[in-house]
Image (spheres, rainbow, N blue to C red):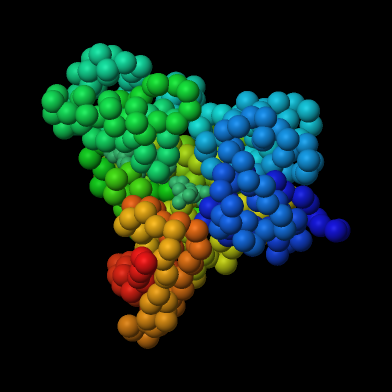
Amino acid sequence: MGATAKILLLGSGELGREFVISAKRLGAEVIACDSYANAPAMQVADGFEVFSMLDGEALGAAIEKHRPDLIVPEVEAIRTEVLKDYEDRGFTVVPSARATIMTMNRDRIREVAAQELGLRTSTYLYAETREEMRAAVEKVGLPCVVKPVMSSSGKGQSTVRSADAVDTAWDYAVAGMRGDRQRVIVEAFIPFDYEITLLTIRTRDGVLFCPPIGHRQERGDYQESWQPAAMSDSAIHAAQEMARAVVDNLGGYGLFGVEFFVVGDTVIFSELSPRPHDTGMVTLISQNLTEFDLHARAILGLPIPGITLHGPSASAVVLADRDSADFTVSGIADALRPAAPGVDLDVRIFNKPTTRPYRRMGVALALVRDGTVEDARAAARDAAAKITLTYR
Ligand SMILES: Nc1ncnc2c1ncn2[C@@H]1O[C@H](COP(=O)(O)OP(=O)(O)OP(=O)(O)O)[C@@H](O)[C@H]1O
Ligand SMILES: NCC(=O)N[C@@H]1O[C@H](COP(=O)([O-])[O-])[C@@H](O)[C@H]1O
Ligand SMILES: [Mg+2]
């Protein structure tokens, strides 16, 4: 086929879909994998495979069948030991098998950040039983945040505000955890002023940063994001140095979404994704190169001469509210009509085959040429509100 590189994409959601488009524009061939057919990235890829990424045998079989130049994880939940195995046999895992193992397990990345690198994090303890969790909550203090060590997008996460809530939080964490380790992290609740994602790109020519992205989360899941987040120079510098330390420790090439809480001028490391981040979808309108373009260039060894911001920008999510396999999406024309001049609007509709409560089905994007980040946030929220899901 004469492709520049053959990529096996592990996970085929909305982030994968945009990544496939970016990689294909640079001549790559992409085989998209996920646990269900017709996933968003499969719809735009060269080929697809349907299997659970947690099934080590099926994962190995897909790697053997396609013999990709690059294995690119798109979700956290992957049988990562298999990736390590194939890396040892000479395959390239993006950014590295170790990075996928460390970040899939909150306790492992926390140990690297807090113990090995000495970065500031929330106070934390681990627990493997209800009783241990009760003791951990007492030591860490109230309020605190409880999360399964293996989970993402807020699954199994809750905030404990009183001692009576310990049982409910434990049960919720156990129900929301994935993988075979019944273990939670109990973190002191950080009353942050704001939180950011710092998109950090590790390339052969060094480490690059995008302007910081602010975001708002509900139920541990992102609702809106904006760029640039207003931050002091010293806070940006502190976040960049922490992000650099973490990505250099993890190694490999690619884009990482490094999450921080900010209190005054104090920057606290939270966690990171060794791949494009959901809050980074704002870069689909805000930058000359999107986070997906940057990931593709970094892993293909292509130059990134500069990252420029077009102006204050924002993204706002479109969520479903029930389970359905028969629904339509409408209102796109209204969503794309700006209420004011000087505002660019766009949408991404993911075409997921089914809905479920709070499932992200699309995102609205806004860029204001002559205005503020607040204007961009309002424009993105208004556009998202115009998109409706009708269930049949
Ligand atoms: N210790 C904490 N104090 C205050 N808020 C917190 C704390 N930990 C998490 N949160 C809130 O919950 C959100 C989700 O937490 P976190 O990023 O750890 O979960 P996640 O499941 O990995 O999410 P994702 O996979 O979407 O990144 C954070 O962005 C923040 O808003
Ligand atoms: N915070 C991680 C994240 O945003 N991941 C993105 O969501 C998809 C899963 O969506 P689904 O649960 O709707 O299938 C993943 O495939 C990825 O694109
Ligand atoms: Mg997070």
Return the x and y of residue 137 as percentages of the image width and height. 23, 21
Check the image and report above or below for 256 versus 15.
above
Residue at image x 86%, y 58%? 2
Q: Which residue lies furthest to the right in this view?
A: 2
Quadrant containing the C terminus in the rendered view: bottom left
* Drawn side of residue 214 relative to residue 203, left or right: left
Residue at image x 33%, y 74%? 386
Q: Can you tell which quarter of the image residue 18 is in?
A: bottom right
Check the image and report above or below for 72 versus 148.
below
Return the x and y of residue 236 as percentages of the image width and height. 41, 48
Q: Nearer the viewer, residue 289 or 66?
A: 66
Residue 210 visible (yes or no): yes
Residue at image x 67%, y 58%? 45
Q: Can you tell which quarter of the image residue 92 is in?
A: top right
Return the x and y of residue 119 as percentages of the image width and height. 42, 29
Quadrant containing the N terminus in the rendered view: bottom right
Residue at image x 54%, y 43%? 75
Check the image and report above or below for 247 versus 371.
above
* Drawn side of residue 146 relative to residue 209, left or right: left
Return the x and y of residue 29 as percentages of the image width and height. 75, 56
